[in-house]
Image (cartoon, rainbow, N blue to C red):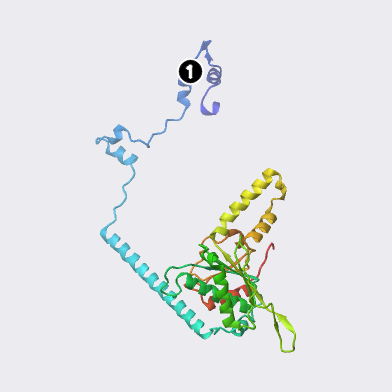
Amino acid sequence: MAAIGITKREELAFRRGVINGKQLTAKEREELMKPFLPLEPIKTSAPSALSQSPKSPKLTQRTTSAPKPKPTPIRTFLHIVLHTVISFVFSIFFRFRRAWRLFSYKVRGVLRHHHHTPEWIVNDVKSVEQLPKHLSVILEHREDDEDQGNAGLEGLVQDVCEIAAWTASAGIPLLSIYERTGVLKNYVPALHAAIQNNLESYFGTRRRPTLTVKAPHTISYSPPGTPSSEPTENGSTTSRPHLTVLLLSEHDGRDTLVDLTVTLATMAQKGDIRKEQIDMNLVNAELSDYVSSEPDLLVLFSPTVVLKGYPPWQLRLTEIFHLPDNKGVNYQVFLKALKKFGKAEFRVGK
């Protein structure tokens, strides 16, 4: 400790606590080292009585922070004007953009209307490189809809019938309809009849595809009303295309995952299944059997991406499509989704 001015004798006295044969107390050892310690820092966290005294203005200015400048009326007025101008400009821009998009959607819908003719839809999708094998859409049960005019259960069923006809015309075998409340599951026979009548208006009685309507945890509804084959001009028969419509609701999402977890845990506790057998492949197989397989394409007819409780496990590798500022079910959204899916490049695991 010679570098800080402590002699060898003082260092030994401090370490051993003895000087000239006399045992030093703790206070004496502290007094021995005090000349060599740095000065105590000035505490500025709590102002002392001296700093609060009016007789020491310099000390008060040093320990307290400088007051913030008060906003002047001119500066406040400029801030309000600037905020109002920016909000007005952006409001005009977004309203103009929404109006332009809605106008373009209407024009395209009129120019490229399918006229309930499957051949038109086939011609629209013939340039698509790949079509999804499982198409899923999200619909909403609205009590009133002034813009689209398809409110209530009747409007919801009409949307399902149109989408089913477009899907069958494009040659997609599986269509899943997600509606959060699950109201369609209560009218499976009536929905089957409505879809079948709409398919007949598109294809006619002789070329109408066969149809199956089903929902998770229920029996598939497919009455034998349409033959599975049709005769051709040369006397042979060809098989009719088949369309499967799957009805999904919010209960088929997280609630099903919870039920499956409880079931697997109970089976593992009873010894019916080993813990090593419970993996992602088993969960995927069980959910595919009880709910559905993963859709290749999910189409939203809303202006924003809102899944509304869609089963999360089925969306791991799904392509999601929507058009900004669009509202309501229309054929242009359906066609644009198929074209975008045809150009998509999937690199699973690469």
Please tell me in which quadrant of the rendered image residue 168 appears: bottom right
Estimate how packed mark 1 is, as few (under 14), some (14 to 19) or many (20 or more) residues with alpha carbons within 10 Å.
few
Q: Is residue 324 visible?
A: no
Secondary structure beneath disc 1? helix
348 lies above or below 120: above
Tell me residue 145's x, y (percent).
Answer: 42, 72
Tell me residue 85's x, y (percent).
Answer: 34, 69
| Quadrant showing the N terminus | top right
- Tag 1 residue: 26
Q: Is residue 49 visible?
A: yes
| Quadrant showing the C terminus | bottom right
44 lies above or below 348: above
Please tell me in which quadrant of the rendered image residue 35 appears: top left
Asked if residue 49 lies left or right of residue 314, the reply is left
Q: In percent of the image, x 46 and y 17: which residue is there?
A: 28
Q: What amino acid type should be assigned to the residue bearing mark 1?
A: Ala
Question: In the image shown, does 160 or 282 lie closer to the viewer?
Answer: 160
Question: In the image shown, does 215 or 130 lie closer to the viewer?
Answer: 215
Tell me residue 253's x, y (percent).
Answer: 57, 58
Question: In the image shown, does 189 or 144 lie closer to the viewer?
Answer: 189
Quick one: which residue is furthest to the left in this view? 54
280 lies above or below 13: below
